[in-house]
Image (tube, rainbow, N blue to C red):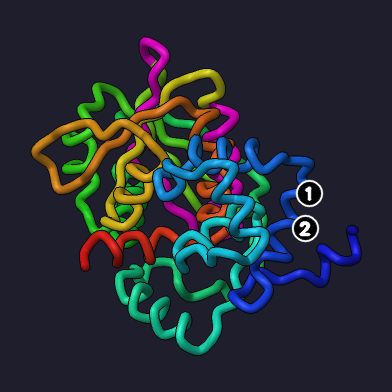
Amino acid sequence: MTTQLNEAVFCKENFATVLRQFRKSYRLSQQSLADDLATNHSLFKNINQSMVSLWEKGTILPSLNRRVGLANFFNQCYQYDEHELKVVIKARKHKTAINEKPNIYNYNINQIKEFWFDEMTEDEKALIYNAHASQSGYDFNETIEHIDCKRLKVVCFYYNNSIIGHLAFCAAQNGLIKLASVVAIDKNIKMNIFKFIQTLSSDLMLVIPSFIKYYSHMLNDIYLEEIKNDSPITLHAGKSEVVFNNPFVKHVLDGNDDLALLRFEQHND
C-alpha cells in the first residue's frame, strides 16, 4: 500500500481509485471521511457517506474545487490537465506577488528575542514598520489600531545578527491572543514562525487579521468567526488548535493555496 500511495497522484483520470487508496491508508470509513471534510471546510458541508461512495465508484466525478480539496485534505497536490490548468491560472491572478520570489541563500533561525514594542528603539521600530508595510500593504500603526491592541509584544527571529522574520501580537488576555503582523523573508522561515505561534497560542483563542481577500474568504470557509469592523482589514477568531489542526490550513501554510484561490474565484463569478 505504501508503494502504491507513493506512486498515486490525484488527477481527473484516476481520481476515484486514488481517493479510495488514500482514504483506506488513513484508516477512515466513508462516513468518517465525509464527517471530517464537512467539519473542516464549508465546500464539503453537505457531503455524506453515499456521496463518498459514488465518488469512489467513479459514478460521480466531484467538481474541480472538490477534487483539489480532497487532494489537499490528504496533504497532496492535484495534477491538473490542460483544461483544468486554464481554470487554475485564471484563479491565480488573484494571488498576491508577496513572497513569490524564493531566497537565493538558505537562512535558519538561530536566535529569538522578545520585546515590548514601546520599549524598542526607533531604528528597531522602523524595521518592523517597513517589513509589515512591504508584505501586508498596510501601515503598521493603522493595523494596530484596527485590531484594538493596548500593548504590543514583538518577537524577532534572527540569523546571526540579522532579522529574518518577526511576529507582533497583543499579549494574551482573557484567553485571547491577537495577531498583528507576521513577516518572514521566505516560506520556510514563515512556517517556523507559525509553529512558534501554534506553541504560543496553545489552548487559547486566536484573532487573525487578513490583509488579502482570498485568505479572508478561506478563513470563512473553515468556519472561523468573522469579527465585524469598519476596517478593510478583516478579522477572524477561532481556537488555536482548530486553526492549526485543520488540514486545509496546513496545506496553505505549506505554500499551496490553489483551493483558496479557486474558491475566491468561484465566489466572485
Image quarter for residue 94? Answer: bottom left
Of residue 269 and residue 244, the one placed in the foreground of this image is 269
Image quarter for residue 4? Answer: bottom right
Q: Residue at x 66, y 65 (%)?
A: 16
Rounded to the nearest whole Å, what is the CA distance between mark 2 and mark 1?
Answer: 5 Å
Please name the residue that numbered disc 1 is placed on. 24
Place of residue 3 in the rendered image (x, y in percent of width and height, measured from the top left): 90, 65
Q: How crowded is mark 1: few (under 14 residues within 10 Å), some or many (20 or more)?
A: some
* 192 falls in the magenta region: yes
Place of residue 145 in the rendered image (x, y in percent of width and height, measured from the top left): 17, 34
Q: Would residue 236 appear left or right of 108 to someone viewing this image? A: left
In what element is the residue under mark 2? Answer: helix
Residue 123's place in the image compared with 67, above or below, is above
The reply to whether discs 2 and 1 touch (Cβ–Cβ < 8 Å) is: yes
* 148 falls in the magenta region: no
Of residue 146 and residue 245, the one placed in the foreground of this image is 245
In what element is the residue under mark 1? Answer: helix
What is the magenta range?
173-200
